[in-house]
Amino acid sequence: MSITGYVIVATTILFASALQGSIGFGIGMLSAPIIALVDPSLIPGTLIMIATLVTLMVVVRERESIDLHGTGWALLGRVPGTVAGALLLMLLPARGLAIMLAAVVLAGVAVTSFGWIPAARRRNVVLAGAASGVFGTATAIGGPPMALVWQRSEGAQLRGTMSGFFLVGSLMSIAALAATGAVTGHTLIMFAALVPAALAGYVVSRGLNRVLDPTRLRWLAITASALGAVLLIGRELLQMGG
């Protein structure tokens, strides 16, 4: 990777990590499309590792606000979703999978924006966890399903619960990717090189948390979901045109 490429990726990671630290998700949605244009080999392995680091820091910070009951049911769905995501990554064309997942995200965001908010019942949380496992393992974009089902949570609870779920879920995804040979030496080296950017983003998130009320938090989560999906589709269309 060139110096210019590294600067672009590191800057993207910084902003995406700040979002992750503020609302509990977003690092994959905002950074995956941009990073894939610079170095596709960083998706999903390196990006999931970066997300794991950021979520670990948020879990430590918001540990008293985590909804352990909800996290447990979400992780129950995450297990089969993770396996399915790893298999999809191996079996399906990357472009078709990315566009399909982005379309699902946009559909969920559209429904929620018009006033429908799925109740955080056990069934919905398990299904969201499964969808997040598929999305997160295959494309490093696993936040939207959980954001939609947990969007009524308060700031600290949303960040803590989302991060607790993604910490365990990301470790599952890394294990699944390693088992399928998707984690390489390059994956680990680039993870180490991007750690400073992730740490800087986490520091920025602490300032953002002071100005985000519940309404702003909800709409930031919805907007981030939509933006990530649009960028993902745009990336694939650009690659098709090239």
Image: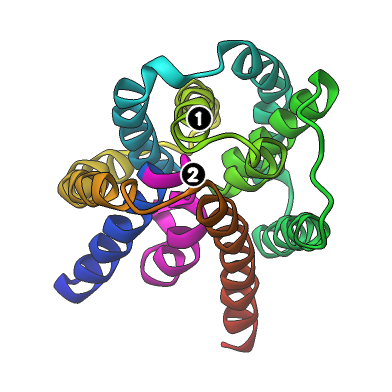
- Magenta residues? 22-44
**Does 136 sit above or below residue 10?**
above
Image quarter (top left, top right, bottom left or bottom right) of the N terminus: bottom left
Q: Secondary structure at mark 1?
A: helix
Residue position marked by numbered label 1 in the rendering: 166
Q: Secondary structure at mark 2?
A: loop
Discs 1, 2 touching: Cβ within 8 Å: yes
Q: Quadrant of residue 78?
A: top right
Q: Main secondary structure of the magenta part?
A: helix
Residue 204 drawn at (x, y percent): 23, 52
Q: Which residue extends farthest bottom?
A: 241
The residue sitting at 78% across, 55% down in the picture is 112
Q: Front-most of 80 and 187? A: 80
Residue 137 drawn at (x, y percent): 58, 38
Residue position marked by numbered label 2 in the rendering: 25
Q: In the visual, does 119 lie left or right of 49?
A: right
Q: Front-most of 113 and 7? A: 113
The residue sitting at 36% across, 25% down in the picture is 62
Residue 153 drawn at (x, y percent): 59, 34
The residue sitting at 48% across, 47% down in the picture is 44
Q: In the visual, does 153 lie left or right of 53?
A: right
Q: Which mark is residue 45?
A: none
The colour mode here is rainbow
Type of amino acid at the residue the image marks with label 2: Phe
Type of amino acid at the residue the image marks with label 1: Phe
Q: Quadrant of residue 132?
A: top right
